[in-house]
Image: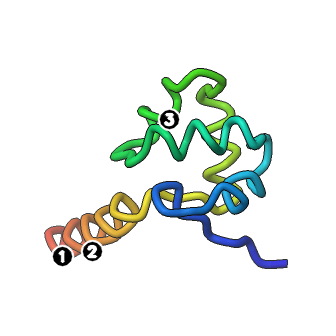
Amino acid sequence: MAQKKVNINTASKEELASLPKISDERAQTLIDERPFDSWEEIDELPGFDERLVQDIQKSGAYLGEEEEWSSEEEEWSEEQVE
């Protein structure tokens, strides 16, 4: 079964709560505190820690712009090497 991608910055409360270990309360915290520019910001929220952040990333959660930027950076890095 394919993972469902969930953008932390735009997902509904229900979508966020579908992530592992994300209760309705944690989902609401994410909604109240967004937008996020980095995973470290989420790690610092009450009720969140590095392990939880890693778990939700592995389950398909992402930060929209960060994911696109990382992809562009990777392409740029590959061009510089050639």
Crowd around label 1: few <14 · some 14–19 · many ≥20 (10 Å): few
- Locate residue 19 relative to residue 49 in the image: left or right: right
Q: Secondary structure at mark 3?
A: helix
Q: Which mark is residue 42?
A: 3
Q: What's the mark number on residue 79?
A: 1
Name which residue lies at 50% across and 35% down: 42
The alpha-carbon separation of the residues under discs 2 and 1 comes to: 6 Å
Quarter of the image where one finds residue 54:
top right
Nearest to the observer: residue 15 or residue 70: 15
Badge 1 element: helix
Q: Earlier in the sequence, mark 3 or mark 2?
A: 3
Name which of mark 1 and mark 3 comes first in the sequence. 3
Give the residue at x 27% y 74%.
75
Amino acid type, label 1: Glu
Relative to 18, does residue 27 appear above or below in the rendering?
above
Quarter holding the C terminus?
bottom left
Q: Nearer the viewer, mark 3 or mark 2?
A: 3
